[in-house]
Image (cartoon, rainbow, N blue to C red):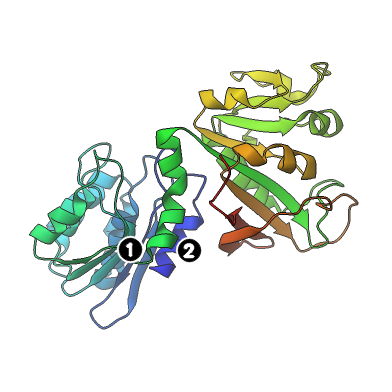
Amino acid sequence: MKLALDEAWKYQGLTYPNPAVGCTIVSQEGAILAIEAHKYAGAPHAEVEALKSAYFRLRDDSKILDLHESSQIHTYLLQNHDNCFMGTTLFTTLEPCSHVGKTPSCASLISKLGIKKLFIGSLDSNHEASGGAEIVTSAGIDVERAVLAKECGALLEPFNLWREENFVFFKWAQRLNGTTDGGIISSAKSRTLVHAMRDVCDLLVIGGNTVRVDRPTLDARLVGGRAPDILIYSKSREFDKTIPLFSVKGRKVIISDDFSLLKNYKNIMIEGGEKMFELSREVTNSYLCFLSPSIGGNNNFTSISEKLEILNIQKDEQDIIMWIKQADNGGNK
């Protein structure tokens, strides 16, 4: 389950409005056959991606690698599995879906492949998709629930929050000496990841001083994505309208000295440094830090005292990427 969790966290912030989910499949002999995740809304669910990878490893049938639509993969597995999954065990961070929507039911597929045991981290709080555990149990598969329940619950929290109200995360980049100024900090791969997150965000919040000094565009050009609406947090409404972010087509730019606008959006990213970190404490649910292996700059988080808990750590080609929450209750919101 830990392998499934780590894989899913790689896509946290990219799957909106779907949850981030990971899945691991283990052979009867205990070998890892697949570790996969749900990558973006509309893509196959984590269980389907894992079954696809495991099938290829077990049967060396490369035809399945050419299939990318969930329904195509479902059909191919059902027609060609030839009992290759007999005795295998599946670990998934979230209960397999029961309903047929944009993708077929994962629970139905799992129940027909000869899988021996299913471990589930979190049950699905979405009533439309819940009930998968019962479908699998009815097929004679041994099901164990609440495996690494706390960790799987933390992974699922953004999904639960934006379904009820909204999810707000604060993103920043810093060097090893804690500085957040002085030009580009994070790697090209990290910046591309942030652009992919912007592509699925409804709203991006930025401080007025950052806009005036950096003159940013704040779009998703590195992934060819859409640009989110912008909230510039500022007491002064005077800005040079030649700053690139004002010229992006199809977006709203709002200037305000409060966060009341956030209630109109679901998936919200705040970008900034020390001052914005402090200003947004009461509305932030989670934090995302990109730590660069470099030293330089001048400004860092010197005046803030905050106890934080790391939820997950990843490493790309250069940076360390950390999802974090406030240590008390995951946020004051």
Mark 1 or 2: the one toward you: 2
Residue sticking out furthest to the right: 298
Left or right side of 180 for 17: left
Relative to 285, 122 lies left or right: left
Q: Nearer the viewer, residue 62 or 56?
A: 56
Across and down, in percent, residue 297 comes to 89, 52
Can the viewer see residue 37 in this picture?
Answer: yes
Relative side of 18 to 70, left or right: right
Q: Is residue 149 left or right of residue 110?
A: right
Q: Which is more N-terminal, label 2 or label 1?
A: 2
Write the residue at 30% across / 57% down. 47
Q: Residue furthest bottom?
A: 29
Residue 15 in sight here: no
In the rendered image, the quadrant that contains the C terminus is: top right
Q: How far apart are the alpha carbons under marks 1 and 2?
A: 17 Å
Tell me where residue 15 appears, x and y as whole percent: 45, 43
Query: What residue is pinned by disc 2?
Result: 6
Give the image location of residue 36, x and y in percent.
Answer: 39, 60
Q: Are marks 1 and 2 in contact (CB under 8 Å)?
A: no
x 39%, y 51%: residue:
38
Question: Quarter holding the N terminus?
Answer: bottom left
Residue type at mark 2: give it.
Asp
Give the camera-side residue of 305 and 1. 305
Q: Which mark is residue 53?
A: 1
Decide which of 321, 41 is in the foreground and name it: 321
Vertically, is 301 above or below 200? below
Quadrant location of residue 57?
bottom left
Q: Residue at x 15, y 60 (%)?
A: 80
- Above or below 61: residue 192: above
Q: Which mark is residue 109?
A: none
